[in-house]
């Protein structure tokens, strides 16, 4: 099971990334757990300077933008 984390303080783009991630996981039957990391210190521990960001299994794969649903699908598979 993949561990997907949306890193962000709760801004509209962060919420959009979280919702898009949920949608891609549900629609494609991907075995994943999605969580939010909203604590600034924890986000900085990932080395992220721009949010929203996305980490899969602890590795940051996107930072500073909301990827398209198609991009997310590729990242999650």
Image (cartoon, rainbow, N blue to C red):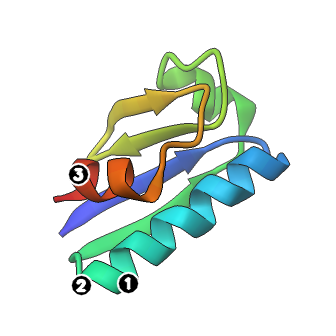
Q: Which mark is residue 13?
A: none
> Is 63 placed left or right of 16 in the picture?
left
Q: Position of residue 14 (x, y in %)?
A: 70, 48
Q: Are marks 1 and 2 in contact (CB under 8 Å)?
A: yes
Q: Nearer the viewer, residue 8 or 21?
A: 21
Q: Is residue 25 above or below residue 52?
A: below
Mark-to-mark CA distance, 1 and 2 = 5 Å
Q: Is residue 19 above or below residue 47?
A: below
What residue does disc 1 label? 26
Which residue position is annotated with label 2? 29
Camera-nearest residue between 49 and 62: 62
- Name, please, the residue furthest toward the right: 11
- Picture residue at 49% right of the left edge, 73% below the top: 22
Q: Which residue is mark 3?
A: 74
Q: Residues within 10 Å of mark 2 (few under 14, many from 20)?
A: few
Instruction: From this view, report whether residue 7 is shown above or below residue 41.
Output: below
- The percent coordinates of residue 38 (x first, y second) are 71, 46
Tell me which corner region of the image, top left, top right, bottom left or bottom right, holds residue 48: top right
Q: Residue at image x 26%, y 80%?
A: 28
Q: Examine the rendering and report whether any part of residue 10 can be seen.
A: no
Relative side of 22 to 43, left or right: left
Q: Which residue is depicted at the point 54% across and 64% down?
A: 20
Q: Circle 2 sits in a helix, a strand or a loop, which is it? A: loop
Q: Crowdedness of circle 3 by 10 Å Cα count: few (<14), some, many (20+)?
A: few
In-front residue for pair 63/36: 63
The Cα atoms of the two marked residues, 1 and 3, are separated by 14 Å
Mark 1 vs mark 3, foreground winner is 3
Image quarter (top left, top right, bottom left or bottom right) of the C terminus = bottom left
Please tell me in which quadrant of the rendered image residue 2 appears. Answer: bottom left
């Amino acid at each position: 099971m993949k561990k997907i984390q949306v890193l962000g303080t709760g801004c509209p783009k962060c919420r959009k990334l979280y919702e898009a991630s949920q949608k891609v996981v549900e629609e494609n039957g991907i075995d994943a757990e999605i969580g939010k990391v909203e604590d600034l210190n924890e986000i900085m521990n990932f080395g992220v300077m721009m949010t929203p960001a996305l980490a899969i299994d602890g590795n940051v794969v996107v930072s500073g933008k909301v990827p398209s649903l198609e991009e997310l699908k590729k990242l999650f598979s």
